Amino acid sequence: MSTVDVQADVQHSAVAERPTVVNDFSFVAATVNGSGSQTANSVLIRAIFKMGIPVNGKNLFPSNISGLPTWYTIRINKDGYIARREGTEIVVAFNKNTAAADLAGLPEGGVCVYADDIPLDRARTDVTYYALPAKELVKQSGADVKLRDYVANMVYVGALAELLGIDRDEIKAALTFHFQGKTKPINLNYGVVEAAAEWVRANNHAPCPFRVEAMAKTTGQIMIDGNTAGALGAVFGGVSLVSWYPITPSTSLVDALNEYLPEFRHDADGAPTYTVVQAEDELAAIGMVMGAGWAGARAMTATSGPGISLMSEFAGLGYFAEIPGVIWDIQRMGPSTGLPTRVSQGDVLSTYFLGHGDTRHVCLLPGTMADCFEFGYLAFDLAERLQTPVFVLSDLDLGMNSWLSEPFTYPQEPMDRGKVLSVEDLKRLGSFQRYADVDGDGIGYRTLPGTDHPAAAYFTRGTGHNANAIYSERPDDWQGNMERLDRKHETARRLVPKPVIDQHAAAKLAILGFGSSDGAIQEARDRLTTQGVATSSLRLRALPLTDEVRDFVAAHERVYVVELNQDGQMYRLLCMEYPELATKFISIAHCDGLPLTARFITEQIQQREG
Amino acid sequence: MATAAKPGDNRKINLIGLERTDYKGNVSTLCAGCGHDSISAQIMTAAFDLSLKPHTIIKMSGIGCSSKSPAYFLSRSHGFNALHGRMPSVVTGATLANRSLEAIAVSGDGDTGSIGFSQYKHLLRRNVPMVYIIENNGVYGLTKGQFSATADQGQKLKYAGLNELPPIDLCAEAILSGCGFVARSFSGDAKQVRELLKAAMSYHGTAVVDIISPCVTFNNHDESTKSYAYGKAHEEPIHDITFIKQYEEITVDYEPGTVQVVKMHDGPTIRLKKLDRDYDPTSKMAALQLLEGAHEKQEFVTGLLYINEGRPTLPELQHLPSTPLAKLSPDQLRPGEDKLREIMATFM
Ligand SMILES: Cc1ncc(C[n+]2csc(CCOP(=O)(O)OP(=O)(O)O)c2C)c(N)n1
Ligand code: SF4
Ligand SMILES: [Mg+2]
């Protein structure tokens, strides 16, 4: 098909005779931020997903709008391991500034696909090179000069399709999906894909040592990111007010809300049954959430570490004045502005204790796409049941990368709106005490503003108060109130999601983790098993810690606490909560801005186990 | 049958059958003679006179002596004493969640002019429907007498020393931020405070009423513009206001020929009786000029400085339905299972 007159440019490597690797390798596309490579990468990952092969994509992008290097890694694994790995077998070097380093990072026997206008020093002889005439192919596609840069990345899509054996029909289907059926961009991009694939077929002398082959392991699954999953969960949880201030990596959660709310949340006249307000800062964002939660609406905000810091005083007010609200923290790397586009689990301690004085918050810890969806609505049920702010600690890896999942299950329980007294209730009761522990679970009854009964009103305040919500400095009032809040926290302990436990009777060792690191942990466990080391695992899904956690820890000799931060925050929290078990915990904390890998966890445990 | 209670009328029952005591609050714990208490009294009277339904009112505040005062009026209304400077965002959330609520908020000059300045400006920009009362004493009362951002330049305080910075005029700031109802009064002028509050309570949008309210404990030196002595001597009312709700008998307590009528959103009118100047409260520029001129003379003009009824409120801009978001039924809140299936199909 191609008429490009370029010499075949393949250099056989010394290791090319190795057996072909099928469905178990990774590749990275090294491009320039803002060059439109996101389209190319999402098309590739979707095509592989639709071929039935387990796959995961991780975008390593800079805090920059355009110009800085960005890497998108796709891991393909027939056994379903989708955690990050150190290194990739294949690099697509489309950024001249990083090409030399990208090449140097390849293992022996690796593959380097690059644009031939990049002056690459091909000194390494243990690598197979494919130089693509990217500029020429794009030119011949007939793309408008202004659009050429955007379609240039389709050259590596086409080349990889040919080299790896990615079904070209699936590429076209993925483009159709991406451009929502708009024929013009589909055809333009697919033209480049085809031209590149044909060129590689015509000019390539070396078979690629890595191939994909269709499987049936992803049938019926969805591919989604955690921010979209969380937003959908909130939509099905009846979110009615969203107030937020933009911050990476939480912005796409609100983008998703803005995408789905108009379609699914309006009344018979078409009026929206929700409102989204872009606040002036995170203080105002959570202030609006508190105001709305107090008035009886399901309200949420989404932010990241710096925003959490600003929300501190309101979080304390919400805890003490007992006001429902939901706060998503899509964690990124801190302290300070830190690495805004890199993942971390560094807000565990600050968020659990957010606020001054004695404060402990309910924190949900999603680790899968299904969790993100479920916690999207469950957070509201818990917030209203417990009359308190509920935090959902997701992270950049979960929130912004593409993950496979079973389709989400519709909420099985009706919404829990908590203990709210109606006019009828008040008529029956005659009066009520806002902060009295009538049921022994630490949770009082509240009324909503607007309730038409002379006894409905009470005064909400962050100052000391008695059971009637009247200002009080009496020591017994203060202490009684704090003790009731403790009881409420114990109630929360019983209500929050239970951990996911895989316990082996023979295992002395256990790995305890949470959030996005689960893939790496499960892969590490399988590696350890093959080396004769049996482990159990526990994935936390919430704070406060539930009783199952204590039992699990007690049943093991050593519990490795794996997390993505510098200080071992969850490890410290566990030691604090279970001082009698503290000597069992061993911290494996790591924090370099990248998702955890199975190799790192395996090596850490091997080293310590000797 | 209940009859309308006119200002100063001592008849016991208002139009909705409530007594004055139904609008009372807890006993104040502020200093005896604090200007803030006089304002609380007028809030109660205004709400009684207008026959406002206590259960539809929310009393909101930040932190400060002034912000404590919602506990001292309208006990039959829900109240929320929020954080220092953050009352605006809480009111924004509450009124979006339930647009049938009527918010009456009290703040201080520190609460609004310093720590809460950003929230103040953004609230005004959004035109959140509410009455925003600033009890302005030029000091931080509750923290014992530091200067606030509205303190006069050159003013001396016992502990804080000399203030060399120019004051922020919270009315001018309101006008600049698009607020459509901006008034100033003096806590010692019960009648004017009451009438302005009534007008504010009937306004559709954010109504700012900045009330000079002397702190008898920390800022009542005669040379302070926020003292009683100064207030009485230098107050310059731009007009008398008699607020008349639609169903009230129109009184003749104004001078024919010098009356300007401003029609409020929901029907009632405000009558402005001009005193010594031909003042048009519908002109932004005139209002700003007036304030700037008063500044130079270290005077404060009282009355309705600016009114503009044109702006839609935040719930209107958000196209919210008449059913409050807080009262949506479960099936209005949670889309059906078929919807989830539809969405899931798009990710397959
Ligand atoms: C975050 C925070 N910082 C400081 C304070 C201490 N504080 C309480 S009231 C106040 C000033 C109040 O001044 P103003 O709003 O003018 O009210 P006034 O007491 O004069 O009526 C300050 C600084 C606080 N409550 N919260
Ligand atoms: S200190 Fe000043 S502002 Fe506070 S209550 Fe006393 S007089 Fe009022
Ligand atoms: Mg003050």
Image (cartoon, coloured by chain):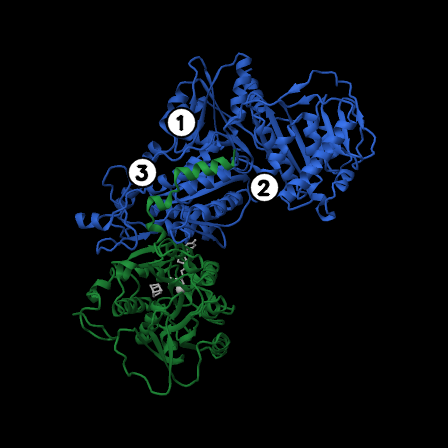
Chain colours: A blue, B green
For the residue pair A106 and A55, the one nearer the viewer reads as A55
Q: Of the residues under marks 3 and 1, which one precedes in the sequence?
A: 3
For the residue pair A254 and B255, the one nearer the viewer reads as A254
- The chain letter under disc 3 is A
Residue A474 drawn at (x, y percent): 26, 48
Q: Of the residues under marks 2 and 3, which one precedes in the sequence?
A: 2
Kindly state the secondary structure of the residue where label 1 is placed: helix
- Residue at 37% across, 25% down: A548
For the residue pair B227 and B285, the one nearer the viewer reads as B285
Q: Is residue B82 left or right of residue B77?
A: right
Kindly state the secondary structure of the residue where label 3 is placed: helix
* Residue neighbourhood size for the residue with mark 2, other residues' Cα within 10 Å, grouped as few (<14), some (14–19), many (≥20): few
Q: Amino acid at mark 2?
A: Gly
Residue B137 drawn at (x, y percent): 39, 68
Q: Amino acid at mark 3?
A: Lys
Q: Which mark is residue A181?
A: 2
Vertical arrangement, residue A278 with respect to residue A588, above or below: below
